[in-house]
Amino acid sequence: MQKKVLIQELRLRLTAKFDQLQETKAGLIESRDSDTKSSAGDKYETGVEMIQQELERTQGQLDQVEKQKEFLNRISLTPNAVVGEGSLVLTDKASYLIGIPYGELKLETGNVYCISSASPIGELLTGTQKDEVITFREQKITVKEIL
């Protein structure tokens, strides 16, 4: 599995997600701005408040995607001796990209779990070296390669 290909795929997916969130945001703004005040004032205020809350939630997601894209731009393609932020870790059980909490990424070359270094398995993997064994949920996992 190539780290460069993985990062390119993640970029594509994050860009698509960002574009979709931008469309959602634009739709919410249009909905909020075109909502005319009806005679039922409380109902109008509640509707506007719900749209505003959804706008804030969408903006939070947009900010998160931006941070993830920035992180991808900082990842070094040079293999590391020790697992850290930006490492692609191949184990005997699964493959992990440390640093972006994206979830499972299904690729033709296999699945990769994109996880934060603060996640339970991310914490265990951080600082390990090739051929080290960690125990996660009573299961032994061997680090086979660090890219």
Image (cartoon, rainbow, N blue to C red):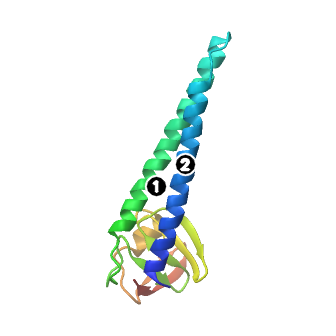
Q: In which quarter of the image is residue 16?
A: bottom right
**Image x and y of residue 139, in percent:** 55, 79
At label 1, the amino acid type is: Val
Q: Earlier in the sequence, mark 2 or mark 1?
A: 2
Q: Do the residues labelled 2 and 1 touch (CB within 8 Å)?
A: yes
Residue with the mark numbered 1: 65
- Using a 10 Å C-alpha cutoff, classify the residue at mark 2 as few (fewer than 14 neighbours), some (14 to 19) or many (20 or more): some
Alpha carbon separation for disc pair 2 and 1: 10 Å
Residue appearing at x 36%, y 84% in the figure = 129
Using residue 92 as the reference point, say whether residue 43 is left or right of it: right
The answer to whether 63 is drawn above or below residue 103 in the figure is: above
Q: Which structural element holds mark 1?
A: helix
Of 12 and 58, nearer the camera is: 12
Judging depth in this view, the residue of 67 and 87 nearest the camera is 67
Q: Which amino acid does label 2 sit on?
A: Leu
x then y, percent, for residue 55: 53, 37
Quarter residue 24 falls in: top right
Provide residue 81's location: percent of width, then percent of height: 31, 85
| Callout count | 2
**Residue 134 visible to the viewer:** no
Residue that carries the numbered disc 2 in the rendered image: 21
Residue at the (57%, 70%) spot, across then down? 105
Across and down, in percent, residue 119 comes to: 46, 63
Report whether 123 appears left or right of 10. left
The numbered dot on residue 17 is none
Nearest to the eye among marks 2 and 1: give it. Answer: 2
